[in-house]
Amino acid sequence: MKLLLVVLATLLSGFIHGYDCKIVQFIFGDSLSDNGNNNRLTKSFAQAALPWYGIDFGSGIPNGRFTNGRTVADIIGDKTGVPRPPPFLDPSLSEDVILANGVNFASGGGGILNETGGLFIQRFSLYKQIELFNGVQRLIRGTIGDEKANKFFQEAKYVVALGSNDFINNYLMPVYADSWTYNDDTFISYLMETLRAQLMVLHGMGARQLMVFGLGPMGCIPLQRVLSTSGGCQEKTNTLALNFNKATAKLMDELSAKLPNASYQFGDAYDVVNNVITNPKKYGFDNADSPCCSFGRIRPALTCIPASRLCKDRSKYLFWDEYHPSDRANELIADELIRKLRFKPVNKTN
Ligand SMILES: *[C@@H]1O[C@H](CO)[C@@H](O)[C@H](O)[C@H]1NC(C)=O
Ligand SMILES: *[C@@H]1O[C@H](CO)[C@@H](O)[C@H](O)[C@H]1NC(C)=O
C-alpha cells in the first residue's frame, strides 16, 4: 500500500511537473497581438471590447483582439504547433496554464517607448510587459525550481512585435514631446537603443529563440490615408517603417552574434502587404484602402463600434478598421513570416 502511494505520488508529480518538454511562447506586443489584456485595463481607451470585433472568432463576441478573427501570432502558432498563449490578465492564468501555454503580454497602444500611447491612459509598454514577465518567472521558479525553469524559459519561443505606435501614437503626433525632440534619424536611433536594452534584459531572463516582427506600410493604413487630400498613402510614414525595419534587422544580427546561444531573428511582411495595396485583385482582395468596419461617412471613426456598418465580404478587405488588418490579411502576413523565418513545427512528439 505504502509503495503504491509512493509510486502514485511519483507519477503525479511527474505529471504535474512534466511540462518541461513542452515548448511555449511568450508574446510581447501591441494591438496587433493583444488577445484580451486591454479589455481588462478598465481605464484604457484602446480596447476591442465592442462589436464587431471578434465577429469571425469563435462565438463572435468581442474577445479583445483588434480584428474580426485571428491575429498574426494566433495563425503562426497554429501553423507551427505552438499553443496560443492566454492574455496575462486572464483570470484563469495559473502556473499550470503558463507551463502548458506561455503568456501573451501584448497590449493595444503599447510601444517600445514608455511614453508611447500616453493618450490611451492605460496600456502596457514593452518595459512594463517585461516587468510582468519577470513576475511570471518568479512564480514559475517557485513552482518547478530554478533548474527546470531555466530550461523551460530557454526553450521557449519569444515574439516581440511593437513599433507602429511609437510612430502613429507618438512621433507623428505633435502632442507628444518626442515629435519635437527628435528627427527621423535620431528617433529611430532612440528606438533601437531602447529595443537593444530591452532584448538584452530578455536574454538575461532566458530568451534564446526570439523573433522581432517588423512594420508594414503603416502610411497606407486607412487612418493615415484620410490625412492626405488625395487619400493616398503617406510616403513619409512608409519611409519611417522601412528605415525602422532596416535598423531592426541589423540589430538582430548584432545581438545574435554577441549574445550567447541567441538566435534573434527579424521578419517583416512589408513587401507582401505593399503588393496587395498596389494590386489587390491579384491577391484575392477587393479593397485595400478603407476599413471593412466603418461608421458611414464619418472618417476616421477611430474604432469599430456597434453602429458601424460592415463590408459585405470581410475576407475581401485588407483592413478591418482604421488601423488593423483583417483576419484574411493576417493570414497572408503570417504565411510570409513563416516562409521568411523558416519556422519549423514544434511539440510534434506528443
Ligand atoms: C519605463 O518604465 C518602467 C516601468 O514599466 C521603468 O522601470 C523604467 O525606468 C522606465 N524607463 C524609462 C526610460 O523611463
Ligand atoms: C549555451 O548552450 C549550451 C549548450 O546547450 C549550454 O551548456 C550553455 O549553458 C548555454 N549558455 C548560455 C549562456 O545560455
Image (spheres, helix red, strand yellow):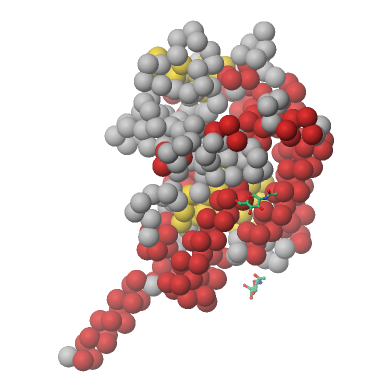
The quarter of the picture where residue 232 lies is top right
* Percent of width and height locating residue 237: 71, 25
In the displayed orientation, state which residue is furthest to the left: 1
In the displayed orientation, state which residue is furthest to the bottom: 2
Image height of 112 relative to 118, above or below: below
* Percent of width and height locating residue 66: 47, 32
Image height of 132 relative to 121, above or below: below
Q: Nearer the viewer, residue 257 or 161?
A: 161
Decide if residue 223 is in sight here.
Answer: yes
Which quarter of the figure is the N terminus placed in?
bottom left
Q: Residue at x 65, y 40 (%)?
A: 115
Q: Nearer the viewer, residue 15 or 202?
A: 202
Q: Nearer the viewer, residue 124 or 323?
A: 124
Q: Residue at x 67, y 12 (%)?
A: 228
Decide if residue 159 is in sight here.
Answer: no
* Percent of width and height locating residue 333: 56, 35
Q: Residue at x 46, y 16 (%)?
A: 294
Which quarter of the figure is the C terminus placed in?
bottom left
In the rendered structure, the answer to whether residue 320 lies left or right of residue 342 reads left
Image height of 232 relative to 70, above or below: above
* Total marks in image: 0
The quarter of the picture where residue 274 lies is top right
Q: Residue at x 60, y 65 (%)?
A: 206
